[in-house]
Amino acid sequence: MSVSRTGRTSFILWFLLYVLVCECLPLSDSDTVMHGELHSPQYPEPYPPNALEQWDLTVPEGFQIRLTFTHLDIEASDGCYYDSLTVLHNGKLLWKFCGNENSGDGNHPGHQPILSPGNSLTLIFQSDDSNPERHQNVGFFAHFQAIDVDECSAPETGNGPLCSQICLNTLGSYLCACHHGYELRSDKSTCVLTCGDGIFDEPEGHLSSPGYPNLSPYSLSCQYVISVKNGFTVSLNFSDIFHIESVDSENGPHCLHHWLQVTLPNREPVKLCGKKSPGLIDTNSSSVTLEYHTDNEGMSKGWSLDYSTGRMKCPMPGSVTRGRVTPSMTEYFYRDHIYVRCDQGYKLMMNGQEIKTFSTVCQSNGQWHLPLPECHIIDCGDPEPLLNGGVTFLSGSQNQYLSLVQYHCNEPFYSLEGDQNVTFTCEADRQWRSNDLAVTKPTCLPVCGQPTQEIRDFLRIFGGKDAPQNTIPWQVLLTVGSGRGGGIIIADKWIMTAAHVLAHKGQQVSKDLVKMYVGGTEVGAMINSPLYAESVHVHPGYDSVDDLSYNNDIALIKLGNPLTFRAAVMPVCLPAKDSSYTTGKIGLVSGFGLVNDNGSRILTNRMKYVQLPLVDHKKCNDSFNLLKERKHKVPHLTNNMFCAGTPEGGKDACQGDSGSPFTLTENKQFWVAGIVSWGVDCGLAGAYGVYTKVVEYLDWINRTMQEN
């Protein structure tokens, strides 16, 4: 709306600018305002004489001006001759106002709004120079507003309807539209018959033939394409009123002249006609083409349908042996996911490869994007091998889930720790677990002091009897350079011997000079399979500089490779801390030292053994004191030593037996009580053999083996 004012007294009213866009009648006047206020000069004070004011109000085409007076008090006169407010439209007088609500003369507009016949109004206020009631008439105050014209309901007189079919009122204008099957002509007011040639891509909609439910026009060739997003299918729901001309036959209606053809991708088209509605058709396709045809004669009322869409359906996925498909539903549709989980103890397999998880999705083409996997029984792999033992399958096979195995040791040379049977089961986590859920395999401990063959009689070493095979399997033949000694197997990697075999006059021999032989009784057969030392450990308290001190005569040799125990090679037991060395108790001494051969001393080629009793420590010490009176050099006897032998002599260890074992038995188990250490001659009457007392060195033995 535009406002202009002229007169002796002028002023400009500013209002908020509204911009109206109308399809039919666009505005070009950027100064147009759509509402405002008007009042006489000096209002609410009395207006002055000789006043002349004019307001030109203009709003866009398609609008009218509504004028509402909140107050009007102008000098009343007959015909509003003197003072007045004149309202004009295009120069034509519409109203002339004066007076007030209570005056008898004049013409007062009242409180009802007045409406312009067009989109403009002109208001003129004038006062003369003679006012008997000067300063009492205050003039007027009014509001104006642009009001949309409903052209559709009130067309101009004599012009007829604005639109031939549908008129739509818009702000400041109007639009014409057509019924389905018609389109608007270029004059934007009249409609012409048309159909099809459109693509309907909304998820739902309504379609009908031209003129439905009235008769369809002749010579129609209409096409309707419904095309929705991939993954969705179209369903056609025809209304009950369905009539397309057909030719009846024994096989049903023939669609010769009029028809509605339904075409789906990759399928044969289907023609519909007759009087029976097809009802609901699920196309299972995202695209449907409808073609409606009539010729130049006949009668068809046509058809109407509502179409809707749903997700594409996928086939049932099937089942998996030893597995579960989730979620379990009666139908699966586009974007549905399914998952496969195997039963406990089974694994997912696809294309020969194990997979951690599996899911597949129903695709837009109605197919699952991956085929179902298989569930195969899990495999724990071979049970961890048991050193010096083995494993036996009790149930199951091929290391599969729930297979049961039992570990056993190579008896009688090894036994399970705790002497209990240990079974392991292949569990679902692919671990072999015992009944207490442990995954650590058991340990086979060597069986000590229990040879597979017994010695049935005992003779002296010095001139003694050959040891039968496998009767003393812990005996070691030990050489240091060209010298010979003995050793004792106490563990799979440890040999115990006398310190003086490995150290001379304070100097320890090189480990490279040390060779050991086990598993036999004949030297000639044994020397072909030497064992080598990884390290040599002489007791730190051993000192034999003067050859008179054999205290702490004990040493350990660590082997480079562990021994595997068998009948010919077994360890002897170490003594218990509370072991008893009872005088008179019979022990067994063995070795490869000197023997008496018809009065001559020779180095034996076979292992010998002899039975000797323990001798009272004081008695032994007294015998050496007597010898000291006859000899110059007799070593010192300490509490770390014990004596064994007979007063008459003849049975004793001798040179080459040093480091060999002196064993005692308890509960049919041999334990090493002593190590052949020293003596005065061999088998001399009145002299005894001296042995290192092993029980005194248990802490050092165990510590050395643990730390090395």
Image (spheres, rainbow, N blue to C red):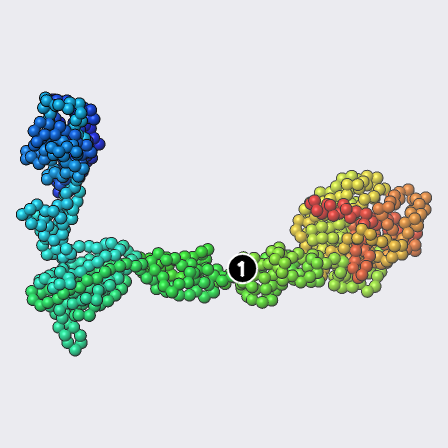
Three-letter residue code for mark 1 = Ala
**Horizontal arrangement in the rendering, residue 234 relative to residue 73 (left or right):** right
- Of residues 461 and 472, which is closer to you in this image? 472
Q: Residue furthest bottom?
A: 250
Question: Residue visible at 45% across and 57% down?
Answer: 354
Binning the other alpha carbons within 10 Å of mark 1 as few (below 14), some (14 to 19) or many (20 upward) gives some
- Quickly name the residue at label 1: 428
Q: Considering the numbered disc 1 on the image, is that residue within a helix, a strand or a loop?
A: loop
User: Total number of numbered labels?
Assistant: 1
Judge whether residue 187 can be spotted in this image.
yes
Residue 650 position, x and y percent, is: 88, 56
- Residue at position x 36%, y 61% in the image: 332
Q: Quadrant of residue 505?
A: top right
- The quadrant of the rendering that contains the C terminus is top right
Relative depth, front residue between 118 and 124: 124
| Residue located farthest toward the front when viewing the structure as drawn | 104
Tell me, yes or no, if residue 604 can be seen here: no
Estimate the x, y position of residue 424 in percent, counting from the top left: 61, 61
Q: Is residue 364 above or below residue 113?
A: below
Residue 222 placement (x, y as % from top left):
14, 59
What x and y, as percent, mark residue 175?
Answer: 14, 47
Left of 262 or right of it: where is 80?
left
Q: Which residue is nearer to you in this view: 364 or 210?
A: 210
- Quadrant that contains the N terminus: top left
Q: Residue 271's image quarter?
A: bottom left
